[in-house]
Image (cartoon, helix red, strand yellow):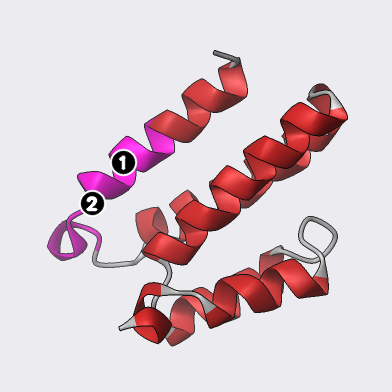
Amino acid sequence: MSSLRNAFAKLQEQWQGYDASQDTTGDLYNRIRINLLELIETAREDMYREEYLRFKKDVIQYLCEICDSQRDKDLLKRFAAGILSPEELTFILANTTAKRS
């Protein structure tokens, strides 16, 4: 497992243990999402194309699972430029937990 996969797993663990009542500023909430996007960006440079595309797909799917608010939408639009294509961003926003409910 690559170090990027390990970092992805750690971010997933952080989110699973996330407690909004202890993150009054929302910094951790935002940081997890931004770090996920940064992993995609790093993977583009560090992984072979096919491995990168699989990894990117996994992270995008995870973003769909954890994003469900206007704050997520704003955050993704702000930080995803150059990392996600407009189509990928639209896919995430159309397939968030709230949209599937």
Cα separation, mark 2 vs mark 1, equals 6 Å
- Quadrant including the N terminus: top right
Look at the magenta stretch and give its main secondary structure. helix
Is residue 47 at all visible to an observer of this figure? yes
Task: Say left or right for 21 vs 90.
Answer: left
The type of residue carrying mark 1 is: Gln
| Residue 82 location (% of width, % of height) | 85, 60
Q: Quadrant of residue 80?
A: bottom right
Q: Secondary structure at mark 1?
A: helix
Query: Which residue shows up at 64% across the image and 48% down it?
Result: 57
Q: Is residue 13 magenta?
A: yes
Q: Which residues are magenta?
A: 10-23
Q: Is residue 6 magenta?
A: no
State the residue in front, 85 or 101. 101
Task: Say left or right for 56 vs 82.
Answer: left
Query: Which residue shows up at 41% across the image and 39% down it?
Result: 11
The type of residue carrying mark 2 is: Tyr
| Residue 59 location (% of width, % of height) | 56, 47
User: Circle 1: is it few (<14), some (14-19), or many (20+) Cα within 10 Å?
Assistant: some
Where is mark 2, residue-wise? 18
User: Circle 2: is it few (<14), some (14-19), or many (20+) Cα within 10 Å?
Assistant: some
Name the residue at the left extreme.
Answer: 21
Where is mark 1, residue-wise? 14
Mark 2 in CB contact with mark 1 (< 8 angstroms): yes
| Residue 40 location (% of width, % of height) | 69, 43
Q: Quadrant of residue 21?
A: bottom left
Query: Which residue shows up at 60% across the image and 25% down it?
Result: 4
